[in-house]
Amino acid sequence: MESTFSLRPAVEDDLSKVIEIENQVHVAPWTLDHFKSELEKPYSQVLVMTDDDTDSIVAGYIVFWVMGEEAHILNVAVGLPHRSKGMARQMIQRAVSTALGKGCKKVILEVRKSNMAAIQLYQSANFTIVHVRKGAYSNGEDAYEMALFLDDEQAPVRF
Ligand SMILES: CC(C)(COP(=O)(O)OP(=O)(O)OC[C@H]1O[C@@H](n2cnc3c(N)ncnc32)[C@H](O)[C@@H]1OP(=O)(O)O)[C@@H](O)C(=O)NCCC(=O)NCCS
């Protein structure tokens, strides 16, 4: 039977597996030190999706900040063998429900204009493009700023 996976807070021992995924999937990957510094920030949550059997396979991870009325999703990734199983959606859902629980009014993030998979993921969770930042990335690519307004009755959270 295929393993089931659940989210839990990351610890430093998880980071070598996180970095393995990070280096495979991102154009400008974060460093180990970057992830370590996120573990130390009181407003940052770093969650890993691990298998329920051994808790040793890291399938994906999310990093988000909860700061006052805003939550920011900074990083989300799923390893190639674990794609298209709803894991990213589950991680976004966790970030949104945490933000709601802490009284945030919106969740925001930035995504490369070319990253169709991520844009569709966020749109399927009711995020909308609120701003385009021209040439935001080092390769000159534009960034879409996307937001989910948690107090907007016209845009209920839907997963
Ligand atoms: C984007 C990413 C996190 C999606 O992970 P995933 O676990 O495979 O996504 P899910 O299975 O939860 O998919 C949820 C929704 O996202 C969208 N989606 C996911 N992968 C997609 C793809 N390759 N093409 C188009 N839409 C896609 C779909 O709307 C999907 O819903 P559906 O299955 O009902 O059609 C993954 O492709 C990834 O790690 N990419 C590299 C890192 C990255 O770009 N992170 C985002 C940076 S802002």
Image: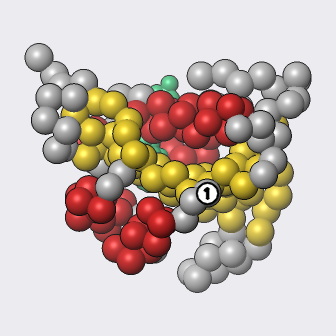
Q: Position of residue 149 (x, y in %)?
A: 81, 37
Q: Quadrant of the N terminus?
A: top left
Q: Tell me: residue 25, above or below residue 88.
A: below
Image position of 126 (left or right of 32): right
Q: Nearer the viewer, residue 132 or 12?
A: 12
Q: Position of residue 39 (x, y in %)?
A: 44, 62
Residue at 16% from the left image edge and 22% from the top image edge: 2
Q: Crowding at label 1, few (<14), some or many (≥20) Cα neighbours within 10 Å?
A: few
Q: Tell me: residue 36, above or below residue 88.
A: below
Residue at 51% from the left image edge and 45% from the top image edge: 117
Image position of 47 (left or right of 118): left
**Observer able to see residue 148:** no
Q: Position of residue 98 (x, y in %)?
A: 61, 36
Q: Amino acid at mark 1?
A: Tyr
Q: Tell me: residue 29, above or below residue 125.
A: below
Q: Nearer the viewer, residue 9 or 20?
A: 9
Image position of 81 (left or right of 135): left
In this figure, which colouring scheme has been used for the structure? secondary structure
Please give the residue where the numbered disc 1 appears in the rendered image: 43
Badge 1 residue CB within 8 Å of ligand 1: no
**Observer able to see residue 90:** yes
Asked where in the image residue 157 lies, by quadrant, the reply is: top right
Q: Position of residue 137 (x, y in %)?
A: 62, 76
